Image (cartoon, coloured by chain):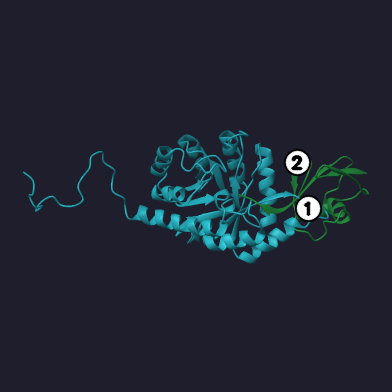
Chain colours: A cyan, B green
Amino acid sequence: MSSFYGVELTSRLLLGTSRYPSPAVLERAVKASGAEVVTVSLRRESGTGRAGQAFWSLIQSMGVRVLPNTAGCHSVKEAVTTAHMARELFDTPWIKLEVIGEADTLQPDVFGLVEAARILSEEGFEVFPYTTEDLVVAERLVEAGCRVLMPWGAPIGSARGLNNVYGLRSMRAHFPDVPLVVDAGLGVPSHAAAAMELGYDAVLLNTAVAEAGDPVEMARAFALGVESGRAAYLARPMEPRDMAVPSTPVIGKAVLGD
Amino acid sequence: MRIFLNDDMHEVAPGTLAAALETLGFGGRKIATAVNGRFVAAAARPRTELADGDRIEVVAPMQGG
């Protein structure tokens, strides 16, 4: 069980809902992943458009909890206003807080992130900050009221996996009691397994499933990767060492040479 | 008066945000709103008077990662 702001979850995979080939594939992928939380967003809609309403009906029919994001926001003001709109629209205090600082890497603007997190936490939001593995920033986010931290694995949509394993491991050691989620940059299930083996509480991904050749099968594969990585963490892996150690006992071996 | 809704200009009768949204086809829809960059809760729309040139944002649920 993982727990985010008092909500207990069985699945440790949080799944995004964007970029799927069709709503039907999205629905099947969510089911195959076992995810109990999906990320959603909000965008402009015209008086004649119905896309947003149809999407919302689909999400509701799945019976999953939603984590709205502030994707695309580049300023504190934008992110805070978007969070308010999301809270009303989705009827949840949860917000995946993104304040983007750099267009090519979509790297978080950690200064704006801390400021927005403080404002939103004081206003009763339960903030899931999309951040880096920087420990000082993470401390500031916790001081600002965040009870979950979501460091990136790699830039959003890059499928590069865990770019800074050392940094992520340090973060886990530094915050043993704060739920940690690797968010963004995962490409294949082994990346998710690696994050879970580090002791992370969950992973959040989207593009790796949505843009796979078979998103439904990839969703299932990620669920297995997450489960496998978590089980391995709990089983306490052996430490790596530099020299070989024979796994087969040498004592009693037949002497056959000269 | 002229208002801008998601950057498109519309001519509407002077009145509230709720009235303008109804006129422009948003009645009963699951949306959230902001006027001139400030969030306006659904409950506040009937008492939010619009002024000429106001910029309204109307958003709906959408896919997200």
Chain at tag 1 = B
Dividing the image into 4 quarters, which one contains the C terminus of chain A? top left
Chain at tag 2 = B
Q: Where does residue A200 sit, x and y in percent of width and height?
A: 43, 49
The one nearer the camera, A250 or A47, is: A250
Q: Where does residue A39 sit, x and y in percent of width and height?
A: 60, 53
Label 1 to label 2, Cα distance in Å? Answer: 15 Å
The one nearer the camera, A193 or A62, is: A193
Q: Where does residue A108 sit, x and y in percent of width and height?
A: 57, 37
The answer to whether residue A177 is left or right of residue A252 is right
Residue at mark 1: B44
Give residue B37's mark. Answer: 2
Q: Residue at x 64, y 66 (%)?
A: A61
Q: Where does residue B49 sit, x and y in percent of width and height?
A: 86, 48
Within-10-Å neighbours for mark 2: few <14, some 14–19, many 20+: some
Whether residue A179 is visible: no
Question: In which quarter of the view is residue B53 placed?
Answer: top right
Q: Residue at x 75, y 41 (%)?
A: B37
Type of amino acid at the residue the image marks with label 1: Ala
Type of amino acid at the residue the image marks with label 2: Gly
